[in-house]
Structure formats: C-alpha cells, structure tokens
Image (spheres, rainbow, N blue to C red):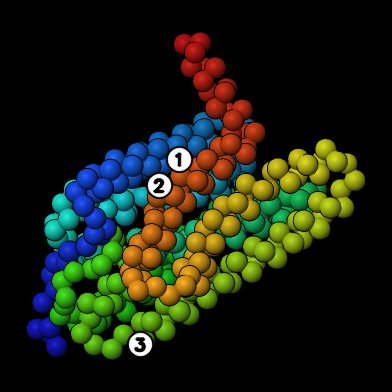
Amino acid sequence: MEKNQIMVTKVILLGFCLGPRIRLFLFGLFFLFYVLTLLGNGVILGLISLDPRLHTPMYFFLSHLAIIDMAYTCSMVPQMLVNLLSPAKPISFTGCITQTFLFLSFAHTECVLLVVISYDRYVAICHPLRYSVIVSWRVGISLVGTSWACGSLLALVHVGLVLRLPYCGPHEINHFFCEILSVLKLACTDTKLNQLVIFAASVFVFVGPLCLVLGSYVCILATILRIQSAEECRKAFSTHSSHLCVVGLFFGSAIIMPMAPKSHHPEEKQKILSLFYSLFNPMLNLLIYSLKSKEVKSALKRALFKESHF
C-alpha cells in the first residue's frame, strides 16, 4: 500500500487538446480576462476601502466577494496559461492537491457568502428601520468569518479524504486544473466514500444556500411589489437585480453541470463549464456590480476627480 501511495509524485494536466495556433489565441484571450479580473476587482476593493460612503455592511460583503473572485483566478488560471504554452509540463502532486483545496475552499465560501449578501438585502428591504441593529458591523464580521471558516473546513474534509487514498496512476489528469473528481481517477482503490461525501457536500453548500437565497428574494419581491411609489419600486428592483444576476450566474453554472445532456466527451464539457468559475464568473461579477451600482460609479468619479486636481 505504501509503495503504491508514493508512485504518483507528478501529474500532467492535459488541458485543452487543441492545435498550437488555437492554444496561442486562447492564451492571449484568457490572459486578457485574467488581467481585467484582477485589475477590476482590485479597483473595486480600493474604492470600498478608500471611500467612506462605501463603508457599509453591504460593501463589506461585496469586498470579500471580490477577494474570492480574485482568488479563484489566481488559484487556477496561471497554471492553465502555462499548460496552453507548455502542454506536457508536469506539476507536483502536492501542488495539485493544494490547487484542489484552494478551489473547493473558494467555491464553498462563495456559496455561503452569497447567502449572507441575500440576507443583508432581505433585511434592508423588509426591515429597513431595524437594519443597522440586525446587520451591525459585529454581525457582519461574524457572518463573513463564518463563510470563510465553512468553506475552508469543508475543503479540508475533502482533501483529507483524498490524501488517505493510495495513488498509482495514470499520471495524467484530463482537465486544466486539479478538479477533485479528476484527481480521484488517479487512485487505485475504491472511491465511493469520497464521491458520497462530495455529493452530500454539494447538497449542503449548493442546494441549501440556493433555497435560502430564493426564499429571501421571494420575500424581497413581495415587499417591493407592495411599494406604491413607482420610482421607489424601480430603484429597489435596480438595487437588487445585480446580486440576483450574480446568484444566477454562480448557481446556474453549478446546476447546468450535472443536468447537461450526456455526451461522448464528458471531460470536455466539464472543462468548458469550469471556465465559468475560473474566468467568466469573476469578470461578469465585476461588470455587473460596477455597471449596476450607482454608489460604485460615484465613488470612481470622486476618486478620478480627486486625482485630476493633484
């Protein structure tokens, strides 16, 4: 058993099986998305930290969502870019497991954080007079800390179960990052326990949070529809539609993955859908919040106006 367990010390991520020209084109495109995501979310974080008008619980939660989006891209995209230029370059098994942990940790944390943001919006609309009491800074910090703790602990459970398995090959993973189900294919023993835990965790961190988010927005929608002023109603819809778009993108891509029609190349389908988590979702989240939020646009104008006077 010990002999088998140390046989896989390095793995090769096969990535996208494409021609050199297409790989070079994808490298340029994905690198552009990567830079835009980091710069854009960095600007959002800077505005939230520097502008006193954005020092509210809602933007505190959004700043952590921006951190998660940046962490997503940093944990997966650099290795993907390397693979596009050097397809046969191996990575250590330790590095592969570390990438698995980071991806799971950020994915789980974002699920819980989206519930926290929906709760914040529920209190703001349905109980506006008690908002500062219910969602105080102390409560906000506790909710964010709980989100990160839950994400990290669940990821540790998965990685702990992965590390207990003996690995003897193959030495190739048909993905552009160390996705946990792909890593399990390297094991030379039964992985039913791991798959059962993955299924249970998926129900806990995807289905549960999705139901809570939808429930909160049903209450929000009912409250908005009772607003008699058309202008106030329009403003309320505009304020909360951005978060609803982000929720739809994140949970939508997670739901589509198992529900998509079976194909002869399921690994290729998995890679394409995984791109939404690593590249498209973080960039779309940035665009949605920056374009829909008047406060963010106003803060950016104030920052640029202030800079122009120096």
Amino acid identity at mark 2 = Met
The front one of 29 and 199 is: 29
Disc 3 secondary structure class:
helix
Q: Is residue 147 visible?
A: no
Q: Residue at (76%, 40%) from the top-left corner?
A: 235
At label 2, counting other C-alpha atoms closer than 10 Å, the crowd grade (few under 14, some 14-19, many 20 or more) is: many
Q: Which label is found at residue 41?
A: 1
Disc 2 secondary structure class:
helix
- Quarter of the image for the N terminus: give it: bottom left
Residue lying at the far right of the rendered structure: 228
Q: Which label is found at residue 70?
A: 2
At label 1, counting other C-alpha atoms closer than 10 Å, the crowd grade (few under 14, some 14-19, many 20 or more) is: many
Q: Is disc 1 in contact with disc 2, using a CB cutoff of under 8 Å?
A: yes
Q: Is residue 95 above or below residue 22?
A: below
Q: Is residue 134 above or below residue 2?
A: above
* Disc on the earlier residue, 2 or 3: 2
Amino acid identity at mark 1 = Asn
Q: Is residue 167 left or right of residue 215?
A: left
Q: Is residue 297 left or right of residue 13?
A: right
Q: Residue at (26%, 58%) from the top-left corner?
A: 16
Q: On the image, numbered disc 3 is attached to which residue?
A: 192
Disc 1 secondary structure class:
helix
